[in-house]
Amino acid sequence: MSDNGKILSALLIGAAAGAVLGLLMAPDKGSNTRKSIWEKGEDLYDQLSDKIEEGKDTLSSWKGKAMDTANDLKNKTMSKAEQFKNDAEDEVRGMANKARQNS
């Protein structure tokens, strides 16, 4: 997990703990306190779900870029290999012609 992710997680956990403690210490009816805690939990769950989706999107984007880069490298390598093969064949033909001329 990156430092930013750790900081965000710590802030969310701290905010949740502070909200729960604040609600528990507030002079309010138990049913209202439970409702408030539930709503805060749902909000935190929604925020966490959004962050997870952002992470998935980022990973998907990185995967796409990595695949594109790998394909580019493969194509360049295949092109170079074909060029080397053709150069070698030309060299062999040249040597064979030279050998025939010398014999």
Image (cartoon, rainbow, N blue to C red):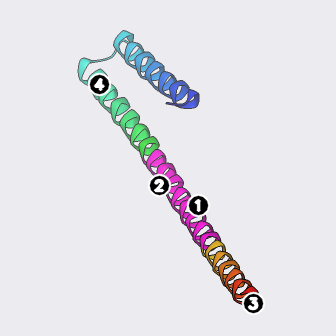
Tag nearer the camera, 4 or 1: 1
* Residue at horizontal 34 percent and vertical 13 percent from the top: 24
Residue 100 falls in image quadrant: bottom right
Across and down, in percent, residue 47 comes to 44, 39
Residue type of the residue flagged with mark 1? Thr
Q: Residues within 10 Å of mark 1 (few under 14, many from 20)?
A: few
Mark before the other along the chain sequence, 4 or 2: 4
Callout 2 amino acid: Ser
Could you say which quadrant of the image residue 87 lies in? bottom right
Question: Label 2, on which residue?
Answer: 60
Q: What residue did someone put label 1 on? A: 69
Element marked by disc 4: helix
Q: Which mark is residue 35?
A: none
Q: Is residue 10 magenta?
A: no
Taking 31 as reference, is 91 above or below it?
Answer: below
Query: Which picture quadrant has residue 68?
Result: bottom right
Q: Secondary structure at mark 3?
A: helix
Q: Are marks 4 and 2 in contact (CB under 8 Å)?
A: no
Question: Measured along the vertical axis of the image, is residue 61 above or below residue 41?
Answer: below
